[in-house]
Amino acid sequence: MRVISLAGSPRIPSRSAALLNLSQQWLQQQGVKVIAYTLHDFKADDLLYANFNSPDIKAFAAQLALADGLLIATPVYKASFSGALKTLLDLLPERALDHKVVLPLATGGSVGHMLAVDYALKPVLAALKAQEVLHGVFADDSQILLNGEQVTLSDTVSARLEEALESFYLALGRRKPPALKLASSLLAQQSA
């Protein structure tokens, strides 16, 4: 299995990136290959001026096309996900998440921002034709303690994150890549 991770925070370090890093480690322990991206992997001018021909964005889209899933993390600002992340997602091909399983992770200043994932991020992921967008994990800032490279999650967030990652891993396993769907269809037609 192969997963792309995308840190959607313009800040380094960030609580959302910390959740993402812990998730990457968990997936790698399960034998999943994780290819990590951050917003800093893309030139600001390419994002700002919507450069669809950016080599960096084309390379990201190509990696995404080969992946089984996407692990995406964002802070919530003003009741929505990161604007820089939205700009990047807008530059992807229309069906960039076709046949992909997506696990969104988000952090915000208070639990009042919890629904931003459902009302802002998930519709964009669905518009990119994600096969399955899982429930995801939201944590408010008080539930994630950053101390340099050390990250401490509250027990509640830790349990929810592990449960979400287990669901993501299972969803990746039951996912049928496009080639397998085509082969199954051809075999069914030949048998008929």
Image (tube, rainbow, N blue to C red):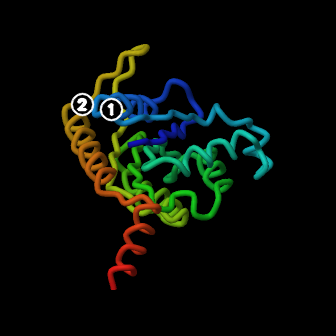
* Percent of width and height locating residue 88: 64, 48
Q: Residue 174 occupies which quadrant of the picture? A: bottom left
Kindly state the secondary structure of the residue where label 1 is placed. helix
Q: Say which mark, if any, is on residue 109.
A: none
Observer-nearest of 172 and 26: 172
Left or right of residue 124, residue 23 in this image: left
Q: Say which mark, if any, is on residue 142.
A: 1
Kindly state the secondary structure of the residue where label 2 is placed. loop
Closer to the N terminus: mark 2 or mark 1?
1
Q: Is residue 176 above or below residue 158?
A: below
- Between circles 2 and 1, the one closer to the viewer is 2
Q: Which residue is mark 2?
A: 154
Q: Please report the residue visible at 54 percent of the width from the left and 40 percent of the height from the top.
A: 8
Q: Quadrant of the C terminus?
A: bottom left
Left or right of residue 90, residue 80 in this image: left
Q: Please report the residue visible at 40 percent of the width from the left and 55 percent of the height from the top.
A: 101
Q: Residue 41 occupies which quadrant of the picture? A: top right
Amino acid bearing label 1: Ser
Q: Please report the residue visible at 30 percent of the width from the left and 54 percent of the height from the top.
A: 171
Q: Quadrant of the N terminus?
A: top left
* Percent of width and height locating residue 29: 29, 28
Q: Please report the residue visible at 69 percent of the width from the left and 36 percent of the height from the top.
A: 42
- Cβ–Cβ under 8 Å for marks 2 and 1: yes
* Percent of width and height locating residue 140: 35, 39
Observer-nearest of 22 and 2: 2
Q: Residues within 10 Å of mark 2 (few under 14, many from 20)?
A: few
The single residue placed furthest to the top in the displayed view is 148
* Percent of width and height locating residue 35: 50, 34
